[in-house]
Image: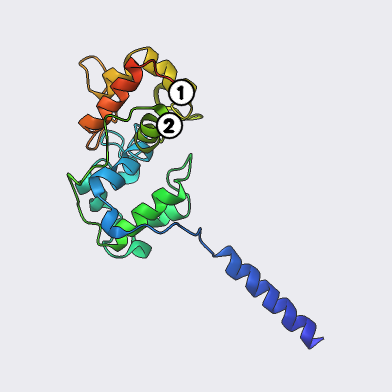
Amino acid sequence: MKLVYFGAVIAAAGLLLGSCQHEVLPKVNASDICFERDVLPIFVSNCAMSGCHDAGTAAEDYILTNYATIMAEGIKPGRPENSKIWEEIEENEMPPNHPLTAEQKSIIKTWIAAGAPNGVNCTSNCDSSKFTYSEAVSPIITKNCVGCHQYPSASGSVDLSSYQGVRDIAKSGAFVHSVQGTIGYKKMPPSGAGLSECEINQIKKWVANGAQQN
């Protein structure tokens, strides 16, 4: 009888420990992370949209649009486990409509653990001679736009989570005008550093080439 009881206790303990396990994240080298290039776009695309953590809404008093505002609340340099923002990301409580990818989570956690440095104007691997959808445009959109522009909560009812959605907005002319900040169009991304000149040129070349799914 005692053996049966002991076995039940061990099994229950195993279940309890299993329920506390967190997602295994891919390894990212801290030296390869640049705040402006790698971290800020995650916050801007997934958190700093209207109705959430932009300057106008500041949900729960959090504004996540630039280095100063991100550091002002919820980040403890060197201690992700004590950083409220990381805790909510790790538990998939933020963003509320869609969890970040494992890679995005790893970038943020590694950046905080490394002291949350404000790296700007970091070396870019952008090559404007490459402008196919698969190699250039889709990665730019995934990194900078999809957080806001995917159903069921697509900002402005613009869904950029599929090629068809990107193609439609590209052929309307609004895609290029928005990323380059043409007067009369809302600049995209709306906050943060924005796309680099190289990234904008990649998009312009892709659109001029017929916005193909190449």
**Left or right: 126, with 5 as reference point:** left
The colour scheme of the drawn protein is: rainbow
Task: Find disc 2 in the rendering and name its residue.
Answer: 134
Q: Secondary structure at mark 1?
A: loop
Q: Where residue 176 appears, x then y in whole percent? A: 29, 19
Residue underneath mark 1: 213
User: Residue 76: which numbered mark, if any?
Assistant: none
In front here: 165 or 191?
165
Residue 111: quarter of image: bottom left
Q: Residue furthest front?
A: 129
Q: Disc 2, disc 1: CB below 8 Å?
A: yes
Q: Residue at left 35%, top 64%?
A: 82
Pointer 2 or 1: first along the chain: 2
| Residue 124 relative to residue 160: left or right | left
How far across and how far down the image is residue 122, in percent?
20, 46
Residue 192 visible here: yes
Q: Is residue 84 left or right of residue 157?
A: left
Residue flagged by tag 2: what amino acid is it? Answer: Ser
